[in-house]
């Protein structure tokens, strides 16, 4: 019983540190920014992805220097995404194992590591996998749902 | 002064007032419709050359113009570089190529033109084909200079060609040309590519005769959900760019333009899929018509009879039918189990035959059926893809197949029996199918099964028509019959080259050749 528990604890710790390593490897947390009071209405109108919610990201962590009124916020563009996610080449390299079958979405045979992030990834609405526009029946074999 | 006279004078005044207002309205609506002149705008930036579009034609024109030392701006409305070119199969037909000489293949320019005219039903503009014969090798060499890599193997023999003359890129995609050409262009000094930037209008000279620039919107987001993105989409911020030498229009075809393609061919319903990328719309083409460019062959839209409604875009069905089921198998009308076309006829004949059925019953997609012996070795890996993805289905018996597609089973079996007998006996079948000739003594469809099947639907693939150009890629005006100064065009936005129907792998040739020529002449 005890050894199982210890194993579990150790396992949990290992996973946790692996996760935090992965997160840390994509840049240090963004600096403090002006505060937007979070309301249930705002949360419903501008939902954020689970992986970002887990990090307790606030509106202005991404919408930097855009004031404090969510109605005025603009899309943050590649630059905004890459302020945490480093570079497109880095993201392509992380999925290098998919290159073998030519299905790396961040380094596709068509586009290389050059697409806009929001060609596929959206934050406040469901993402849309661009590969589907031609490979509708294959994508499910290649990868999971676009985060 | 009589009352009558007064009245008439008053009426005359009224009429005058009305017509003045009417004229004002008329001129206002004209101003809205007509292209602005340089007097109406303030230029934000100035370039030598502006290219619209980043496919084969646009990038070839931009690369050549930039290489000549010009400052070039390239506008692309989509977020992605390359349009249809980057999702294309990477095949380029080059008559009399160095490749053919290396691999000992006999070919001639006359033979190439003859092949194109046969597929094009004789309505091709031959002077444009002659230009391709003269310059295709130069276009190929230029692509190599820009970094494109072509497989060093014997050229492939594509349907409708009388000789093996098609080269294929090393990654078997048009991206094998687009990616290096994009990098080549980006490195040239003075060359700038702006994506998500949509050209709105040509800017004309003060006298309205020449193209001197364009208006555009930056931060434009194309929206595939709109019925007509060109008309309805209001995103982006307006900019005006001056082109001192001129504009090259390389905006592609309109196979995805729900409104314009249906106007030309009412069989194409708005929700119908095509093999093209979402942005293949007619907006820029219509702007060229607006300033007087001459239209050619606009309603000749080539549709792929080998496509399937069970997947999006080009998909895998075209390979599994052309290099498989169509060769020795049959295509049947699901309502009566009968064949309705020669499965190996040209693209247009087959698409028309499928449309006859689909117009009567839009859900009655014909089904093509065959056995393992019909597939060429190269498509074995794709068979797996087709089956896993669900585009192709496999059945142990014809009864199971008939039940799945709701085909009358007895009628289907009778059709296949007759078809097999004809093949076995070496008798010409009712549709004069050429590939059955070699089957003498054998079953074309092996009755032991298993049976493979794919549902069929024609998909718009290439719009033959477009702007009239001359052999220097200058756009011809319908007002003067002469080139519109400052306007060049290349690629699918132009018309005439392919006539009624284009042969496979000649699109890349057309785009790279006339793109290069536009870049040389501007």
Image (cartoon, rainbow, N blue to C red):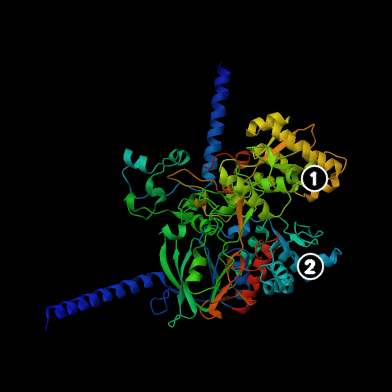
What is the chain identity of the residue bearing mark 1? B
Task: Give residue B487's quadrant in the image.
Answer: bottom right
**Separation of residues labelled 1 and 2 (CA atoms):** 29 Å
Q: Dot 1: what SS?
A: helix
Taking B209 as reference, is A5 above or below it? above
Taking B335 as reference, is B250 above or below it? below
- Give the x, y percent position of residue B225: 47, 50
- Give the x, y percent position of residue B15: 24, 75
Task: Give residue A114's quadrant in the image.
Answer: bottom right
Seen in the image, is B381 located left or right of residue B182?
A: right
Asked whether the viewer can see residue B508, the reply is yes
Q: Count neighbours of disc 1 (C-alpha within 10 A) and say few if under 14, some if 14 to 19, many if 20 or more.
A: few
In front: label 1 or label 2: 2
For the residue pair B326 and B434, the one nearer the viewer reads as B434
For residue B111, which numbered disc appears in the image? 2
Q: Dot 2: what SS?
A: helix
For residue B6, which numbered disc appears in the image? none
Taking B428 as reference, is B76 above or below it? below
Q: Residue furthest top?
A: A1
Marked residue nearer the N-terminal end (1 or 2) = 2
Seen in the image, is B117 located left or right of residue B522?
A: right
Residue that mark 1 sits on: B377
């Amino acid at each position: 019983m005890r050894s199982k528990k210890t194993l579990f604890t150790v396992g949990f710790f290992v996973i946790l540190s692996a996760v935090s390593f992965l997160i840390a490897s994509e840049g240090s947390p963004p600096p403090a920014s002006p505060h937007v009071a979070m309301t249930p209405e705002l949360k419903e109108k501008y939902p954020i992805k689970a992986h970002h919610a887990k990090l307790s990201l606030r509106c202005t962590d991404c919408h930097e220097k855009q004031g404090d009124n969510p109605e005025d916020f603009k899309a943050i563009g590649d630059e905004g995404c890459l302020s945490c996610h480093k570079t497109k080449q880095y993201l392509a390299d992380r999925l290098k194992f998919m290159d073998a079958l030519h299905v790396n979405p961040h380094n596709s045979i068509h586009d290389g590591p050059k697409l806009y992030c929001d060609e596929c990834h959206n934050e406040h609405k469901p993402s849309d996998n661009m590969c589907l526009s031609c490979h509708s029946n294959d994508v499910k074999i290649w990868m999971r749902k676009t985060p | 002064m009589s009352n009558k006279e007064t009245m008439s004078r008053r009426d005359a005044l009224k009429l005058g007032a009305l017509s003045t207002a009417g004229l004002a309205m008329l001129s206002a609506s004209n101003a809205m419709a007509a292209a602005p002149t340089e007097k109406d705008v303030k230029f934000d930036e100035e370039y030598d050359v502006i290219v619209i579009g980043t496919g084969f034609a646009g990038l070839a024109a931009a690369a050549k113009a930039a290489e000549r030392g010009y400052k070039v701006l390239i506008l692309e409305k989509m977020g992605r570089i390359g349009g249809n070119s980057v999702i294309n199969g990477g095949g380029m037909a080059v008559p009399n190529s160095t490749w053919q000489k290396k691999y000992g293949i006999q070919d001639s320019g006359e033979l190439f033109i003859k092949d194109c005219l046969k597929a094009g039903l004789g309505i091709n503009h031959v002077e444009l084909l002659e230009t391709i014969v003269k310059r295709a090798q130069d276009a190929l060499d230029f692509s190599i200079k820009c970094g494109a890599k072509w497989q060093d193997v014997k050229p492939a023999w594509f349907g409708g060609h009388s000789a093996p003359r098609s080269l294929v890129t090393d990654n078997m995609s048009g991206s094998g040309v687009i990616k290096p050409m994009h990098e080549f262009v980006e490195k040239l000094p003075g060359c700038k590519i702006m994506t998500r930037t949509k050209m709105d209008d040509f800017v004309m000279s003060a006298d309205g005769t020449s193209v001197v620039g364009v208006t555009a919107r930056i931060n434009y987001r194309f929206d595939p959900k709109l019925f007509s993105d060109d008309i309805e989409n209001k995103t982006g911020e307006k900019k005006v760019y001056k082109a001192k030498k001129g504009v090259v229009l390389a905006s592609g075809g309109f196979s995805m333009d729900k409104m314009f393609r249906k106007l030309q061919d009412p069989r194409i319903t708005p929700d119908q899929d095509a093999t093209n990328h979402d942005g293949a719309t007619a907006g820029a083409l219509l702007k060229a018509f607006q300033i007087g460019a001459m239209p050619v062959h606009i309603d000749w839209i080539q549709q792929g009879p080998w496509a399937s409604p069970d997947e999006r875009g080009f998909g895998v069905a075209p390979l599994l039918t052309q290099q498989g089921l169509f060769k020795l198998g049959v295509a049947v009308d699901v309502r009566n189990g009968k064949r309705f076309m020669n499965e190996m006829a040209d693209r247009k004949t087959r698409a028309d035959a499928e449309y006859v059925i689909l117009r009567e019953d839009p859900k009655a997609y014909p089904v093509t059926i065959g056995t393992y012996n019909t597939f060429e070795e190269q498509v074995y890996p794709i068979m797996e893809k087709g089956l896993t993805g669900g585009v192709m289905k496999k059945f142990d018996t014809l009864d199971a197949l008939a039940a799945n597609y709701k085909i009358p089973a007895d009628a289907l079996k009778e059709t296949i029996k007759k078809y097999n007998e004809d093949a076995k006996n070496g008798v010409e079948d009712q549709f004069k199918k050429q590939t059955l000739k070699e089957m003498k003594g054998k079953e074309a469809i092996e009755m032991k099964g298993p049976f493979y099947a794919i549902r069929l639907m024609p998909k718009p693939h290439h719009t033959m028509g477009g702007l009239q150009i001359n052999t220097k890629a200058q756009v011809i005006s319908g007002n003067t019959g002469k080139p519109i100064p400052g306007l060049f065009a290349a690629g699918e936005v132009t018309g005439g080259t392919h006539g009624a129907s284009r042969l496979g792998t000649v699109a890349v040739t057309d785009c790279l050749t006339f793109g290069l020529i536009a870049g040389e002449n501007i």
